[in-house]
Image (cartoon, rainbow, N blue to C red):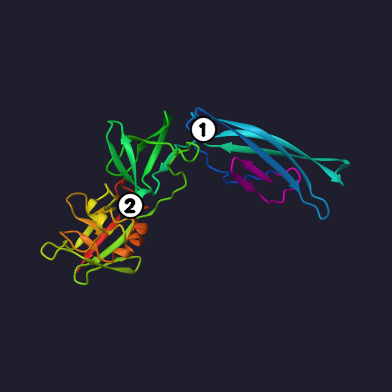
Amino acid sequence: MNIEILDKNLQIYRRIKVGKTIELAEEIGSFPTDQKFFSVKAKITITEKDALFNDTNNIEKVIKVDTNNINAQRYIYMIELREKRFWKNWGKSVAKFEITIKALVAESMKYIPDVDNGWLKVKMTDGTTTSLPAFLKVKSEYIETGREYFTILEGPYKDQTASVHLDNENNNNSRLLTDAKHSPFAYLQYSVSKKKLIIDKEEYAATDHQESPLKKGWYDIELPDYPHSGGQYYLNISSRAKTWFRIGHEGERYLHTGSRSLGCITITETKKWNEIYDKLIKARKGDFISVGVLEVID
């Protein structure tokens, strides 16, 4: 059996005995929409394989989903197969297949794209502009006058509403991502004596402020808050140099790249900062503000 909806294609191969029902837990696809009703054409093809001849038939039906209904919505279709030999009916036997497709409506979760050195400029509801970091989770609300409005679900602007213009170069489609996936929280370790940051058993040369090093202990590492101008001097080496991760939930100590430290943990191997960025930017601790935890040791 093959089910085709928009650009999604689900193929299923099963042996089915006469009179039996098979229930599958396979997803055809996720389809974002900002409309009250989501209507889409589904093409269902059934093929009964045979040693010499494969019998096939298909139907095309419009599925109309009420996006305000959070209960499962079911759509039942019947397809008949007749044996054919050389494109002609063969005998009187008919195989009938009843296909049920289930639709579930979920909140439209999207993510900020990884553009412009890791930051997307958006407009807040008060008219001010700010930049949001890549892969920040948001909830799409509606589209109006060429802009997509969304609620920010994590980070310093959590629960605030913002908007961004549609992609003019791509048929005015959404600029937000629908298929980004977050990973479990990251565990980092920093050795004050060795001046090394360790992530996933990889060591990175770093430095701190000798007169005010971080005390031994545990700290949360926050989501990036805004593009830091101090990183602009290293953009020719690391495209994500302006993305800094705050250590703890207050103060001005950050994890970032550079050549010196005024109290932060500074990764001096600037050419490896993008590698560290990739390890942290999608990681989440589950508190809506942190990407992981840092352990400071001797």
Residue type at mark 2 is: Lys
Q: Earlier in the sequence, mark 1 or mark 2?
A: 1
Horizontal side, residue 281 vs residue 2: left or right: left
* Mark carried by residue 285: 2
| Residue 224 in picture, x, y percent from top left | 29, 50
Q: Residues within 10 Å of mark 1 (few under 14, many from 20)?
A: few
Mark 1 vs mark 2: give the one in front: 2
> Does the CB distance between marks 1 and 2 fall below 8 Å?
no
Q: Residue at x 87, y 47 (%)?
A: 86
Magenta range is 1-20
| Residue 246 in picture, x, y percent from top left | 24, 53
Residue 220 in sight from this viewpoint: no
Q: Quadrant of residue 45?
A: top right
| Residue 149 in picture, x, y percent from top left | 38, 33
Horizontal side, residue 206 vs residue 75: left or right: left
169 over 280 or under it: above or below: above
Q: Secondary structure at mark 1?
A: loop
Would you name the residue on which mark 1 appears? 71
Q: Residue at x 40, y 51 (%)?
A: 182
Residue furthest right in the image:
91
Horizontal side, residue 129 vs residue 114: left or right: left
Position of the C terminus, as image quadrant, is bottom left
